[in-house]
Amino acid sequence: MRAAITAWARRNGLALGVLVVTAGAMVWLVGFEPLLPSDSPAQRTQRVATGDSIEQQGSTFEVTKAGFFTRDSDNAVDVPAGYALLGVLLPITPGADAAAEPGTCDIRLVAPRVDGGRGDRTWTTVVNPAQYDYGLSTGTTTYCTFSDDGDKAVFEGVFLVPDDVYDEARVQVTFTAPKAEDFRQSIYLFELPSDPLG
Amino acid sequence: MSRPVLANRPLRILVALALLAVGMFAAATAPSGDDGVPAEFLVRAEPGEVVTTRLLHSRLDGAQIARSVTTTGWRAEQVRTTGRWVVVTLTLQTRDSSEGISSSLLVIDGVEYSSYTGFDGDLSKYGEGPGVAQRGAIAFEVPAAALETSGAEHAEVRLQTQVAPKLDDVPVFTVDLASASRVDDLELPEPELVKALAP
């Protein structure tokens, strides 16, 4: 009996080894790999505390002011009860080694889901804040662009949101690197000032 | 020394045939795309009910039928049809991010009519963020004869965010178009912010 088993193992050992390796790889790919953290090096998220700034492609970014306006605010806006306009000022200051090629970024507002599930709720900027009687500040821009021309720009983002999200909301700024760097994304979550204008 | 069980040739052939039969049975009975396995989940409701699906809170507020639709705004226009416009008033609120419902369908007697996306100010391009509810309308252009069939009494409005949703839930509202009010011209209501349907 022992000799028969040995002979069988000698004949089928290689096939058995391939089977074990293949099955192991399949189990890993199907069962475990999808569960690994998705925050790969290609996409990094960093939190930025209130008052802190970050440097990206030679320019400095920070959230300096925020406003939270409802229909009952001192500076009232024309939205129904339960809603608010959240405005943020984000100055962009080019440094000495700012990239020659003009860069852009994508700015959104995020907050945890109501049901506590994975992922965030996401708001894009209001295209025409004037429809809600919100006046943009003088000299601000609603597009995130920056370059080495030495001019400081101030991005003003306005978001229409439920009136209970301010405390948990963050400004999400996403930079996408050029093709040479595989379009790697850098994501920053700026905390908002605790004392918004209103 | 005892021989291994499978050393018996007839038994080996029998086992191989049995495995082949099992494989053929599995292949023949495996679900395919035609069996509706990856189809959408229809979440049915009546007008006035709030339906919560993965992406949307939605409510159908009413339906009207018109020969022409007039839009407002800076590019106001009147659009006539040789058929009829079915104009459906809705309240929508997204749950995670902005969504559009331009792939919505009106189904009468099993025939699917896509929503008309040529009107400025309709709700098909709904773009507010989560937690913000908006009321407005979308329109479907259908043959007049389709509204005279018995199927018009229980037509379905499917609010789709994708052309061909798979393994996702879709709100479906049953409407009685046979008894819907009919007008010659209907002014398309502009979207307006309304009280949230859900937190």
Image (cartoon, coloured by chain):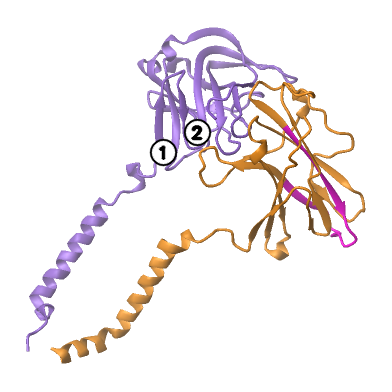
Chain colours: A orange, B purple
Residue B85 location, x and y as percent?
54, 17
What residue sits 52% from the left and 47% below the top?
A118
| Amino acid type of the residue tagged 1 in the rendering | Glu
Chain letter for mark 1: B
Residue A74 part of the magenta-drawn span: no
Range shown magenta:
A86-106
Residue A30: quarter of image: bottom left
Q: Does the magenta portion include A99?
A: yes
Specify the label residue B40 is tagged with. Answer: 1
Q: Secondary structure at mark 1?
A: loop
Q: Position of residue A26 (x, y in %)?
A: 39, 67
Residue B48 lies left or right of residue A10; in this view the side is: right
Majority secondary structure of magenta residues: strand
Residue visible at 79% across and 42% down in the picture: A143
Please state, as top left, top right, bottom left or bottom right, where the C terminus of chain A lies in the image.
top right
Q: Is residue B133 above or below residue A31?
A: above
Residue A62 versus residue B115: which sits nearer the camera? Answer: A62
The chain under label 2 reads B
Is residue A128 placed above or below A101 in the rendered structure? Answer: above
**Mark sitting earlier along the chain (1/2):** 1
Three-letter amino acid code at the position of disc 2: Gln
Label 2: state its secondary structure: loop
Give residue B105's position: percent from left, percent from top.
48, 28
Q: Quadrant of the N terminus of chain A?
A: bottom left
Depicted B161 relative to depicted B17: above or below? above
* Circle 1 residues within 10 Å: few <14, some 14–19, many ≥20: some
Q: Which mark is residue B160?
A: 2
Are dots 1 and 2 in contact, CB under 8 Å? yes
B164 and A193: which is toward the camera: A193
Crowding around mark 2 (Cα neighbors within 10 Å: few <14, some 14 to 19, many 20+) is many
At a point 40% along the width and 62% down the height, the residue shown is A31
